[in-house]
Amino acid sequence: AYQVIIICLRMSKNINLSIAIARPPRNNYYQRHPYPEDIFLLIEIANTTLGYDLGEKKQAYAKAKILEYWVVDVEHRQIYVFRHPQADNYESEVIFRQGKINPLAFPDISVSVSSFFAEN
């Protein structure tokens, strides 16, 4: 099981997501949720919510200027990587089915696409 994290987008509602990589220290968030400028990377694990995650949620994150947003498509074993928000969309969209992804905020770290999926 994973913990659901709520982030404040300074919008009309909070949005639930699977993983947030935020600026330390952790105790900054005891009294408040992270703001968009605190977020390095958001990762949504989409098992049944793919359309929502690639639509409304992606637009909300782009509007909030979240620099990088990943959607893990569990059914198709691929990861959508969105970078560089512009208005209500992202300038860059790449789909990874294999290999490694280097987060913008941590270019020396490689995340294996296969690490998100259980072996059959």
Image (tube, helix red, strand yellow):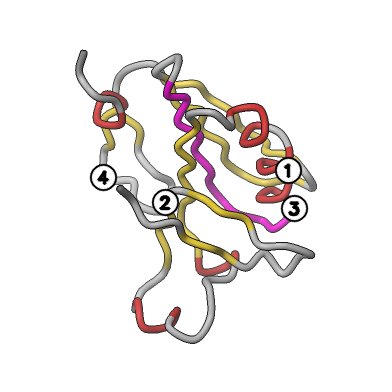
Q: Disc 3 versus disc 1: distance between alpha carbons?
A: 6 Å
Q: Distance between the residues labelled 4 and 2?
A: 17 Å
Q: Is residue 69 magenta?
A: yes
Q: Which of marks 3 and 4 is nearer the N terminus?
A: 3
Q: Is residue 101 magenta?
A: no
Q: Where is residue 3 in the image (x, y as percent from the top left)?
A: 37, 57
Q: Residue furthest bottom?
A: 31
Question: Could you tell me the amino acid type at mark 4?
Answer: Ile
Residues at marks 4 and 1, CA–CA distance in whole angstroms: 27 Å
The residue that label 2 is drawn on is 19
| Contact between labelled residues 1 and 3, with CB atoms less than 8 Å apart | yes
Which residue is drawn at the image coordinates 58% and 32% (left, top)?
49
The residue depicted at 71 percent of the width and 34 percent of the height is 55
Report the side of 103 relative to 36 (left or right).
left
12 relative to 55, above or below? below
Task: Give the label, 4 or 1, closer to the camera.
Answer: 1
Residue 92 horizontal/vertical position (percent): 61, 32
On the image, numbered disc 1 is attached to which residue?
Answer: 59
Instruction: Tell me which label, 4 or 2, sits earlier in the chain.
Output: 2
Q: How far apart are marks 2 and 1 (CA)?
A: 18 Å
Picture quadrant where residue 66 is located: bottom right
* N-terminal label among 4 and 1: 1
Residue on which the image places disc 3: 63
- Please determine whether, in this image, residue 45 is positioned above or below residue 85: above
Residue type at mark 3? Lys
